[in-house]
Image (cartoon, rainbow, N blue to C red):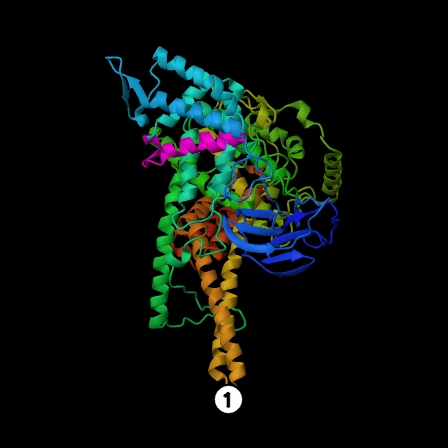
Amino acid sequence: MQIGWCTLNCRFNQEEGVGDTPDSYAYDGNRVRKWNVTTTNYGKSWAAGDIVTCLINLDEGTIAFCLNGASLGTAFDNITRGAGMAYFPAISLSFKESVAFNFGSRPLRYPLESYRPLQDPPCADLVKAHKLLGYLKNVIRFGIDVEGKLVEKDISTWQLQGEPTVLITLAHIFNHFAPLMCKVYLVEDVLMNFLLSILEQGGAVEAHPLIQQLLDLMWLLMEEYEVHECLKQLLMSLLRAYRFSPIVPDLGLQIHYLRLTIAVLKHEKSRKYLLNNVLFDVLRSVVFFYIKSPLRVEEAGLQELIPTTWWPNRFTKEGKESKEVKEESAEERLRRRAYERGCQRLKKRIEGLRRERELCLPSGLEASRYIFLNKFRKFLQENASNRGNLTVLCPPEYMVCFLHRLILALRFYWDDHKAKTPAALDSEEAYVPPQLFYNGKVDYFDLQRLGGLLSHLKKTLKDDLAAKANILIDPAELQAVTMDDLDEDEESAVSMMQRPTAALAVGGALARPSWLSSPTLGRANRFLSTAAVSLMNPRRPLGSLEKIKVRTLSVEQRTEDDIEGSHGNEGLLLGRPPEEPETPVTENSLLEILDGIVMMYNLSVHQQLGKMVGVSDDVNEYAMALKDTEEKISRCPKRRRDIHEELLKSQKVFSEKLNHLSRRLAWINVTIYSKEKMQDIYWLLRVCIRTIEHGDRTGSLFAFMPEFYLSVAMNSYSALKNYFSPVNSMEELPGEGVGALAEKGRGRLNSACQAILSNQRGS
């Protein structure tokens, strides 16, 4: 990315961008260079979320840049000026890069007195808005006592109690104030700063009811469209402020903006509007659950938190992990313990922000749970259906943080329901009942099932659904929906005619039908055998119980009754097979959120967990290079001072890089590979294995299970084994442990496969 200024004379193409032509000037923080036909070193490296200020002084003919408000110095002087010369903001982007511009339509984060934005601020409206806000503060601050005198009151305890004089006065103020609050500049500069000042007094968000009172006033005295636009701009301003705040040691800036977001979401009417129209539709609200990883450890305060660095020496010169257990020297032990204490200090700092973020989801999952549920499903659909469209996808690093926060909130409400309903399961025993996969209440948007396409399964297993689950498929849905589906049926029929019914593959497993085309099942033959054999079970005769006709519902078509059920309708649990217990597992809405969490892990979370391991690999590579350099120094002849000096320079470079990487690795280990995060992934693994076990008991209906459940079961096990070690060991996990759990799941499915295979041979 190269950002700066250019004239209309510049002609750019795929090879030449800003800074590559005579009248264009650019700064590149990725390569830390400046460009104007030629290039030289300049500035500092930037990271995602940083703010770059581009300055041009046409009086002096200079161009300069700032990074997060800190000047990088003059980059260019004596730029071309004169009649007919005009400079315009310009940027060259590479694939996957993105940027947000602010030319002055919003307040600048880092304004400079001697420079003006391209777009002048709305000065007249600003004066008017601040004056009206002053009137509003006076109404809140002062009251009339019994003697009719003005008395100053505590602003934090103010309440609208229906006093006619006060209400009429506020109505007059809002008559002029409301139209101004539809403009983004005024919302950010006036309203947001006023609300933030209320929370600056400290204490919990609940200790500041004035914000709730002000939101009540807005809904009472402003037009509905004005409130909607104001809330939308307020949340977008908070999101930008949170996302583009620099990382400081106490994360105070992020906490500051997050607290106001929580206060707004605690207002029920505002929360419902924002969930319905803004939080998932207009902006990526999951940004609030993400803390960007600092590339510049100095600015993040990591040097003060972790003054002593350490890295393990577990690898040989060839890069392979050493099997020999080397005894730790006293000096290395002291360094390791000092490094671990620093990591603990960092963890405590981040805990404060984590606690604030945890309050966001309960606010959205409580009274507004069903709005959240449908928006969350739509969010998953967009990310599942647009895998190649990066502009639509939620960044994977955001998904990781969102997943952990969602697991925390889900388990809180799950166990809360258990406390109220003793017969329900607690979150340690959570699983997704198999009927969610075939009763049409949950939309899986054409994701692959274990048995192939859903349209084919509905036709092939319609009798099994009627016999085992008392479900009749809507006849309109039994017709082939695509030509691919028709071709699939023909291929299936021909191949079945050519293959003996009891044909067995090598190893005793049933030969795989051509229509059973899941690539994941190729990686997990134990699951394949169970599904394939189950699909060929003889169909049972229809039972005498009343059958229920169902059709697949999209997210927009569902109602609350379709989720929770009513008047004998079981909602998401419609079509309970006889193998499932009659007692509900938990609230139906929580089951769908759990299903969504499993899908989230499959979409991008696992990929991101593997990607972040790269920092650990870098540490190992530099540690080996440093060790090799130190050995060369020890062997270097004293007469070869030139070589000795070069080796010392290399040693310094490797040491500095390792110090930097070890602090970055500490941040990643605390935010991504911590013990708490590991326990979340372990819990998700157990959920998948229980879900697979319950699905396997349904026989042929197991084919309806989405394929991603098997993927998540395998990938989460792989993540626990390969990504979290050596920071956290699998042996430290509670319960029976990962290995025993995996073996139990494998044994359960293999035994089920053999039993079904025996029944098939007998028939």
The residue carrying pointer 1 sits among few (fewer than 14), some (14 to 19) or many (20 or more) residues within 10 Å by Cα, namely few
Bounds of the magenta span?
184-207
Closer to the camera in the image, 626 or 747: 626
In the picture provided, is 216 more to the left or to the right than 757? left
Could you tell me what secondary structure mostly forms the magenta stretch? Answer: helix
Indicate yes or no whether the magenta region holds residue 575: no
From what the image shows, is residue 652 above or below residue 541?
Answer: below
Going 62% across and 35% down the picture, which residue do you hit?
Answer: 538
Closer to the camera in the image, 628 or 591: 628
* Residue 269 in picture, x, y percent from top left: 45, 22
Q: Secondary structure at mark 1?
A: loop
Indicate yes or no whether the magenta region holds residue 204: yes
Closer to the camera in the image, 296 or 721: 296
Residue underneath mark 1: 639
Residue 179 visible? The answer is yes
In the picture provided, is 151 more to the left or to the right than 542? left
Going 75% across and 49% down the picture, which residue do you hit?
Answer: 11
